[in-house]
Amino acid sequence: MPQKVVIIGSGPAGLTAGIYTSRAKLEPILIEGMQPGGQLTTTNKVENWPGDIEIMGPELMMNIKKQAKHNGCQIISDTVEKVDFSSKPYKIFTKNGKEFEAESVIIATGATHKKLHIPGEEKFWGKGVSVCATCDAPFFKDKEIIVVGGGNSAVYEIYHLANFAKKITVIHILDKLTATDPIKDEVLKNPKVEFIFNSTLTEIKGDDQKVTEVAIQNQKTKETKTLKINGIFIAIGLTPNTDIFKGQIDIDNHGFIVLTKNTKTSKNGIFAAGDVADYRYKQAITAAGLGCMAAIDCQKYLSKK
Ligand SMILES: Cc1cc2nc3c(=O)[nH]c(=O)nc-3n(C[C@H](O)[C@H](O)[C@H](O)COP(=O)(O)OP(=O)(O)OC[C@H]3O[C@@H](n4cnc5c(N)ncnc54)[C@H](O)[C@@H]3O)c2cc1C
């Protein structure tokens, strides 16, 4: 007998879908993937989750997981390697050699922020190294920070951060910003913002608690200098985790799952929620909201069958 619903991913979107589908008696199976709890498990303080003035990311995700399990969602520690959505029931194959059949699927595999892959980045990830100004800008009030990147998402991050930081140094590998968004002009004329072009970060240094310094290399002259700073925002893009769905459902040019209506994908009975289909908001609360919507859409789909 196929499962009524299989959820792929255990971030805010997947686990919220797990809460709703289990409370709707759909007996969901959730495959949690290689990052149980999703992106928020890589950060420290979260201050914008409604109901908690401040909560640590891993604790928040543990609470949501507990709630999903409490309602009967079956959580499986495995990763999906392949799917076959060509005919019903849909088939899901995992790394540990399991195969699931499902009448419907909720995809909540999130996205991965591109990293610099330089010394210090992992050590200070979530401790001064951030990828989300909306999430972390208030932590850098009156501080000196760096933004790495020069595209549209970088200029939005800079614009937002300029309301908080004392000084922003933008490090960009090219000789000018590549952003096309008009907000670029605001950023260029902001006296708080300085630019170092043709350059990359080569190292992030700090003490046990926080970032204190970075090394910057000019790519043309190969000259290296250090800069004392309090934080780094990496804004060089994000890759939706959709490789395994290519050729099975519609995916846009940037790798995001295309939603045809609400949380429906191009294939009947396959729904998507969270950062995997959302290039705009990329927040825990919006991912959770989309997980709820996908669960309700899925419930309606199954009830019509
Ligand atoms: C450092 C950092 C700090 C942040 N701070 C905040 C904040 O303060 N407030 C806020 O609102 N947002 C914050 N965000 C953004 C927020 O974490 C994301 O918007 C949110 O986690 C997206 O949720 P999601 O469920 O869509 O996906 P994710 O959290 O990305 O979870 C994806 C899930 O899919 C699973 N998965 C992926 N591939 C597979 C596969 N093949 N098989 C099975 N499972 C798979 C992973 O294991 C993971 O469990 C932060 C992000 C980062 C990186």
Image (cartoon, rainbow, N blue to C red):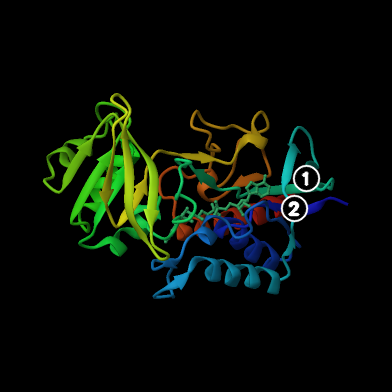
User: Which residue in the protein does label 2 denote?
Assistant: 78
- How far from the left and from the top, in percent, is residue 2? 84, 50
Residue type, label 1: Lys
Residue in view at x 65 percent, y 72 percent: 66
- Give 282 or 42, whichever is nearer the viewer: 42
* SS at mark 1 in the image: loop
Q: Which mark is residue 95?
A: 1
**Disc 1 Cβ-to-ligand 1 distance below 8 Å:** no
**Disc 1: CA contacts within 10 A as few (<14), some (14-19) or many (>=20):** few
**Residue 260 seen anywhere in this rendered image of the structure:** no
* SS at mark 2 in the image: loop
In contact (CB < 8 Å): disc 2 and disc 1: yes
- How far from the left and from the top, in percent, is residue 235? 37, 42
167 with respect to 251 (left or right): left
Q: What distance separates the C-alpha of mark 2 from that of mark 1?
A: 7 Å
Residue type, label 2: Asp
- How far from the left and from the top, in percent, is residue 128? 37, 58
**Disc 2 Cβ-to-ligand 1 distance below 8 Å:** yes
**Residue 236 seen anywhere in this rendered image of the structure:** yes
Residue in view at x 72 percent, y 48 percent: 79
Residue 13 vertical placement versus 110 (above, below): below
